[in-house]
Amino acid sequence: MVGINNLNMKNTKFGIIAIVAILMWACSQNSNASKETESKDVYVAGYIENEQGKKIATLWKNGVPQNLTNATRDTEANSVFVFGNDVYVVGHEYSDIAKLWKNGVEQNLTIANYRTWANDVFVSDNDVYVLGGANIQGNVIGVLWKNGVAQNITAGNSEVFAHSIFVSGNDVYIAGEVGNEEGYSVATLWKNGVAQKLTNGNTYGEVYSVYVHDNDVYVVGEESDDEENETAILWKNGVPQILTNGITVNAVFVSDGNVYVAGGGLNGAGIAILWKNGETQNLTDGSREASAYSVFVSGDDVYVVGNEMVAMHPIIETPIVWKNGVAQKLTNGTFNAKANSVFVK
């Protein structure tokens, strides 16, 4: 009987161990399934025109539009950034006043009575950086608002256009261009206010996006001799890499060592394009004019936003989100609309 009891106890122990193992395996599978099905929120900033032709600054969340203004004046949203539970959008009113919307609540960003606009927004350690510009007595200057306080990017009388900002630790990077006395624009990267020229000043140089990853600084833009026939360029730590000719590049994003660039207009065909490590992927077939303006990578998913023009009278622009190359239209094409920026949480 002792032997039988010991055997029963052993069987019981084995049974308990087996049950625990099965439960642990099941929990693991449920956890993996949860991770695989974890939802992502996709935010897109742009505008939609109403029946009266007024541009309404718009934020789409997972394809659902939210009006940021009441359509009394033309407005446009140029950039979106999500930090924690807060959604920041910047743009401008065409009268012109730079705007910052936090969770839909509007704040004007002004400099005296001068015209202002906002191109990009970045949030780091609860500090809100808004990049844009102002027209002061006919001279365009680059402006950085930090928590609502404005500062000029450069001193002097040169025209400065500031397009993109990235904050890494204590370092603030700004991409744009500066006009010189010869009438050319010099593609420029500022780090903490110190300028680095990316072009030599004998051409037209422009840069539209900056991204910092593992201490490497990536900038994209164009260079041309005559303001036409642009050469698309990716600069890594100041060293240029030519992507192609006759095209506009608008955005750069780096993830897991892979460099993604969004643009359009390949060889004048108007094709929305995504580059990954210099290799091109056409997002459209060239049957309609198209371009890509922003790119964001989340996990294994690559999101690109841009526009496609429909040959109607008048021509209608339709905003599109491409997820891993598959297009989703944000409007039905009845009214003109545009998508400028994408952020995925």
Image: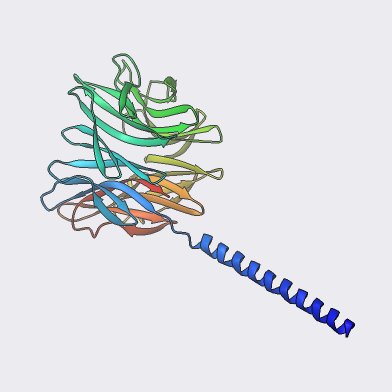
Q: Position of residue 183 (x, y in %)?
A: 29, 20
Quarter of the image for residue 29 reads bottom right
At horizontal 25% and vertical 57% (from top left) the residue drawn is 331
Residue in front for this viewpoint, 33 or 323 = 33
**Number of on-image labels:** 0
At horizontal 45% and vertical 32% (from top left) the residue drawn is 167
**Considering only vertical position in the picture, is 195 above or below 62?**
above
Q: Position of residue 23 (x, y in %)?
A: 64, 70
Q: Position of residue 14 (x, y in %)?
A: 77, 75
Instruction: Tell which residue pokes out farthest to the left in this image.
Output: 52
Instruction: Tell which residue pokes out farthest to the front in this image.
Output: 1
Residue 190 visible, this angle: yes
Residue in front for this viewpoint, 213 or 6 = 6
Q: How is the image coloured?
A: rainbow
Residue in front for this viewpoint, 169 or 270 = 169
The N terminus - image quarter:
bottom right
Residue 229 visible, this angle: no
Query: 34 left or right of 46?
Result: right
Residue in front for this viewpoint, 317 or 108 = 108
Quarter of the image for residue 162 reads top left
Query: 288 left or right of 261?
Result: left
**Considering only vertical position in the picture, is 11 above or below 266?**
below
**Considering only vertical position in the picture, is 245 above or below 160?**
below
Quarter of the image for residue 119 reads top left
Q: Position of residue 342 (x, y in %)?
A: 37, 47
At horizontal 86% and vertical 84% (from top left) the residue drawn is 4
